[in-house]
Image: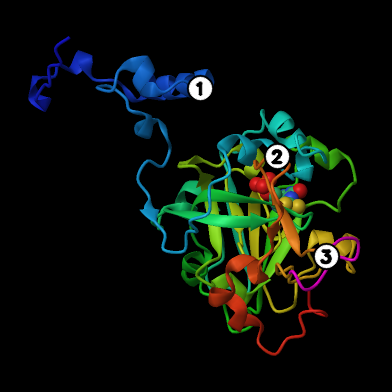
Amino acid sequence: MSIIIKKTDDIRPSEITSKSVYLQRREFIKKMGLTATALLGGAHLSLAEAKAYPELVKSKFSTADKLTSLNDVTGYNNFYEFGTGKYDPAKHAKSFNPKPWSIAVEGEVEKPGVFDLEDFIKPYALEERIYRFRCVEGWSMVIPWVGFPLADMIKRFKPTSKAKYVEFVTLYDKEKMPGQAIKVLPWPYTEGLRMDEAMNPLTLMAVGLYGDELPNQNGAPVRLVVPWKYGFKNIKSIVKIRFTETEPVSTWHKIGASEYGFYANVNPQVDHPRWSQKTERRIGEPFWSPKIKTQMFNGYAEQVAHLYTGMDLEKLF
Ligand code: MTE
């Protein structure tokens, strides 16, 4: 077989793939789960092109831990808006359509507003950041996120001197998120960070994972990722970001203040009232593998321990 490489000006307009055909192919490939190269031949469309974010800046904050498979990252989730079981979100979030999407920025900022997602994320260079992710329930994963530092976004909206905290709110829409019809949590899901935590370079606004758009079950189209905190701080499908003078009350804290503190820092020395936090089970590893020792601040102490100097972490857990 001979492969003829054509100069661009040798290619007739009829040979150029239109955007709509390209997008249809992309959808098709995704559905079929085939590699683009196998299906169409590398000359027209490579697998890298089929991903939403083929070119990403690699972050210096990435861990070298073995990645959790895409199957596990997208198949074993907590997202109560789509059911309380671990396999519910993958099943029930399938028909959720996160487009169009807008985000309101309000409270103690000089430049509040409501923004389309595209305008909201346009100014930032997206990075790939491989972070450890530790759930308060004792399991963990290693996830290659796509995102940008929350700090960059905060600077753009110019918080006033009164802004001491940032509150995040998930979409509240029972039609789109059927789990909200049941009062298992006080909806909408809400979370918060202290301003210095929000400004820490590790804190990420994620818009994707594994080089592609954020799957619905992982919090499409935009979520928070704070790798030194327990998973529940990582609020999904954000529609509102509010700067406040007082500490926001987060959802899990509201329903169980003695079990879920505002800070929620990963800390093997402070047990959950009902179980130990000393070890964790890495999702995807064989069930006979020994449990992993949980690290202080999930292994990110060097970057964040200074934020908590002088605080009693047994009380402010
Ligand atoms: N955000 C919303 N809106 N609703 C939720 O139920 N669950 C939290 C967090 N963010 C949750 C949420 C919990 S408990 C965890 S452990 C993580 O999302 C899970 O993220 P993942 O499914 O992408 O692993």
Nearer to the camera, 109 or 218 = 218
**Is any atom of residue 116 visible in this view?**
no
Instruction: Decide which of tag 1 and tag 3 comes sooner along the chain.
Output: 1
Element type at mark 2: loop
Count of numbered circles on the image? 3
What is the three-letter code of the residue carrying label 3?
Answer: Tyr
> What type of secondary structure mainly makes up the magenta span?
loop
Q: Which residue is mark 2?
A: 76
The quadrant in which the C terminus is found is: bottom right
What is the three-letter code of the residue carrying label 2?
Answer: Tyr
Query: Which tag is nearer the camera, tag 2 or tag 3?
Result: 2
Mark 3: few/some/many CA within 10 Å (<14, 14-19, 20+):
many
- Disc number placed over residue 276 in the picture, else none: none
Mark 2: few/some/many CA within 10 Å (<14, 14-19, 20+):
some
Element type at mark 1: loop
Estimate the x, y position of residue 242 in percent, counting from the top left.
65, 66
Q: Which residue is mark 1?
A: 33
Coloring scheme used? rainbow
Q: Using residue 271 as the reference point, say whether residue 30 is left or right of it.
A: left
Q: Which residues are magenta?
A: 268-276
The quadrant in which residue 264 appears is: bottom right
